């Protein structure tokens, strides 16, 4: 259920949107026509026009997020993934192996092989998810970025909310 085909559109995710440019087969032709308008609206700072919600859908746009975390290896990524699912900070975590990251760190250009975690959670849980990842991650500065999901498969989005509901309803702080 967690690793289905990428059928979710994310708002504010210029990097993710640009990655789809490299994989046009994953987007239906009707979505490809919207790419230039979406890129222009992101560049101008104005939000893209929102499509009208599907009739009968009870999904609130932006209430679920996809968070991205990079890890130094698969062992660390699996440990963090299992922990966030067990703590119900996430409904699902996909591990994407063998990415290459090029970045500037402490005045030097670095290049590392990493594992990318794609974490599906409620948007309200992103701060708790971020704090947990920071507390267990081996990097001095852990990457945790989250993009709200504007649209998607309603049953899947409802499932993400149901799996993580007990944490978002809890008024106690997470350890």
Image (spheres, rainbow, N blue to C red):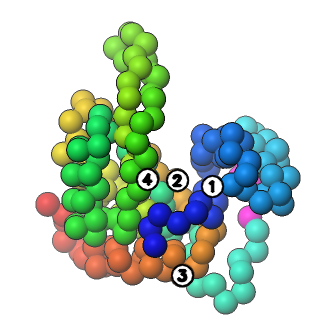
- Could you tell me if residue 140 is visible in this image? yes
Q: Could you tell me residue 53's position as x and y percent? A: 71, 77
Q: Residue at x 54, y 81 (%)?
A: 155
Does residue 96 sit above or below 166 in this rendering? above
Label 2: which residue? 147
* Label 4 SS: strand
Does residue 1 sit above or below 108 in this rendering? below
Residue projecting furthest to the bottom: 56
Foreground residue among 175 and 7: 7
- Could you tell me if residue 45 is visible in this image? no
* Label 2 SS: strand
Name the quarter where the C terminus is drawn: bottom left
- Position of 10 with respect to 28 (left or right) is left
Label 4: which residue? 118
- Position of 143 with respect to 76 (left or right) is right
Of callouts 2 and 1, which one flags the residue occurring earlier in the amino acid sequence?
1
Task: Give how far apart the Cα atoms at labels 3 and 4 are.
Answer: 19 Å
Q: Could you tell me residue 169's position as x and y percent? A: 31, 78
Label 3: which residue? 155
The image quadrant of residue 112 is top left
Which residues are the magenta region? 46-50
Mark number displayed over residue 11: 1
Q: Residue at x 79, y 41 (%)?
A: 40
Q: Is residue 39 magenta?
A: no
Q: Residue at x 42, y 36 (%)?
A: 98
* Label 1 SS: loop
Local crowd size for mark 2, using a 10 Å CA cut-off: few (<14), some (14–19), many (≥20) = many
Contact? badges 2 and 1 (CB < 8 Å): yes
């Amino acid at each position: 259920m967690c690793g289905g085909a990428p059928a979710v559109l994310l708002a504010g995710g210029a990097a993710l949107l640009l990655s789809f440019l490299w994989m046009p087969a994953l987007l239906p032709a009707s979505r490809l026509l919207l790419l230039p308008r979406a890129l222009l609206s992101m560049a101008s700072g104005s939000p893209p026009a929102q499509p009208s919600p599907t009739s009968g859908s009870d999904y609130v746009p932006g209430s679920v997020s996809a968070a991205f975390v990079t890890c130094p290896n698969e062992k660390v990524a699996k440990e963090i993934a299992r922990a966030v699912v067990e703590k119900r900070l996430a409904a699902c975590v996909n591990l994407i192996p063998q990415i290459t990251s090029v970045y500037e760190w402490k005045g030097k250009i670095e290049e590392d092989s990493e594992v990318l975690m794609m974490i599906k959670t409620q948007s309200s849980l992103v701060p708790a998810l971020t704090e947990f990842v920071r507390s267990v991650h081996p990097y001095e500065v852990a990457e945790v970025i989250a993009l709200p999901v504007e649209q998607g498969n309603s049953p899947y989005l409802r499932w993400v909310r149901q799996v993580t509901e007990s944490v978002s309803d809890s008024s106690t702080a997470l350890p």
